[in-house]
Image (spheres, grey):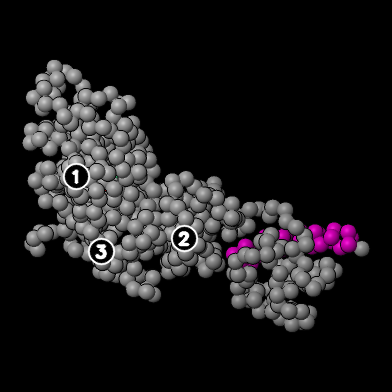
Amino acid sequence: MDSTETVRVRFAPSPTGLLHVGGLRTALFNWLFARHCGGRFILRIEDTDRKRYDPRALPDLLESLRWLGLDWDEGPEVGGPYGPYFQSQRLPLYQQYARQLIENGAAYYCFCSPERQGNEDPTRMTRRGAATGYDRRCRWIDPRLAAERVAAGEPAVIRLKMPLEGTTTFHDLIRGDITVENSTQDDVVLLKSDGYPTYHLANVVDDHLMRITHILRADEWIASAPRHVQLYRAFGWPMPAIAHLPVVLDPSGKGKMSKRKKIAPDGRALPVHVRDFREAGYLPEAMFNYLALIGWRYDAHTEFMSREEIIERFTIERINPTAAAFDYQKLDYFNGVYIRKLSVDDLTERLMPFIQRAGWHVERETLRRIVPLIQERMERLDQVTSLVDFFFVEELPDYDAQLLVPKQADVAATRGWLQSAREVLARVEPFTHDAIEQALRALAAQLEVKTGQLFQPVRVAVCGRLVAPPLFGTLEVLGRERVLQRLDRALAKLAVLEKLSV
Ligand code: GLU
């Protein structure tokens, strides 16, 4: 590459479904490389496979990229000098270039029936990485005769003439030189009989016409690279630098991360599509940082980095060729760290949609008072509802009265402590965190019980569970009236329990 030329990279998804997190990682690495080099990040939509086209895909894609903050310099909605950026709008170009290859003898018309042609699904071919079995029968037809048959209206596809002998080598920026035997490659279809290009033709033509300097793409395309090398040669075009990114593995590390959701031990469906991560309340900041580390690292220990730091440090040399597993626990941990960094106002703002989604009508100001109580213990925004539900219900759902009774305490004693706590809480003035804390601690001392033993029944009485936000702040936000009501209900439950246990 000429040193005056700017780096131009592209993310080239096919709109066949919702954006997968692995796809977002590919986009991120391209974006990071462009921003690191002061280059251009191009978004190109490879929508020539009409059978697999999914109308939800494009809006989902644009929203997902924007969510992560990956802005594109050329592409849908922003345009650019090398458009259109939708392949379906470039069909005449591909047809013209395919004919050019026929004319210079690098490609040929094939009239075989689809059954004879073998499987032409580019992804299946790639996965197998080997010839699909087409026997090249039409390669030997006299080109003049073939042209006449086409002119007479006979349907035909156009195939690339792969060299029959020798090897093809390309240099992968991450993996080094890769060589394949040409005998393992087949004469790939470039243009289908309906005039639509295959992935191979459209991808190569566009990378050339859009002046792409570096191809950073998913590892699953590595088997297509030798065909692309031959295509660039056939056109007489220089090939962009190329790198295949390490595969993103399932959390188990055993297989490629699937497109289907898995169920976590706690019963929740683990997200795989970007939209689901967003809806589960992962922050884009955390996702950005975490995804950057799947297959790339700065050094052996640095994990938390700002966007700017990652951009500054992102080089291809630091991408690791070995596959990396997607670790949900680590992502949750990252997310928790990023949640704790937010201001109370910011977190409140981001939580509001989750509260609304739960169907609760909660004032922003009310939520703002609760946020400091839960900020420390959240790892995902969607946990908000289960953390704060007891603030918003008039009456707590039923809970097991046994939870009120601390270990090494009996029901009667617990009831006595809770009764005293009720008296204290009925009197304490003002009904604020500090005053409540002081009063309850004094009570524990007076009763000669450990604070934990006194606080547990109070906590369970007001929250309905053992693990809950910090107690004194919770009591303050709930307000005296609701606290006393809930204590009364707990006392009644304990009375029943006491009767049962004698
Ligand atoms: N359209 C291809 C995909 O969906 C692009 C592969 C490439 O980047 O060359 O992954």
Quadrant of residue 412 within the rendered picture: bottom right
Q: Which residue is mark 1?
A: 165
Q: Which residue is mark 2?
A: 327
Q: Which residue is mark 3?
A: 316
Q: Earlier in the sequence, mark 3 or mark 1?
A: 1
SS at circle 2: loop
Compared to residue 248, the image places residue 143 above or below, namely above
SS at circle 1: loop
Q: CA distance from mark 2 to mark 1?
A: 44 Å
The amino acid type of the residue labelled 1 equals Glu
Q: In this rendered view, identify the residue nearer to me: 223 or 250.
A: 223
Q: CA distance from mark 3 to mark 1?
A: 33 Å
Q: Quadrant of the N terminus?
A: bottom left
Q: Residue at x 25, y 39 (%)?
A: 186
Q: Residue at x 17, y 37 (%)?
A: 161
The amino acid type of the residue labelled 2 equals Asp
Q: Under 8 Å from ligand 1: the CB of mark 1?
A: no
Q: In this rendered view, identify the residue nearer to me: 60 or 347.
A: 60
Q: Which residues are magenta?
A: 474-501
Q: Is residue 494 magenta?
A: yes
SS at circle 3: helix
Q: CA distance from mark 3 to mark 2?
A: 22 Å
Q: Under 8 Å from ligand 1: the CB of mark 3?
A: no
- The crowd level at tag 1 (other Cα within 10 Å; few <14, some 14-19, many 20+) is few
Does residue 409 appear to the left or right of 77 in the view shown? right
Any part of residue 448 in sight: yes
Residue 83: image location, x then y, percent: 16, 42
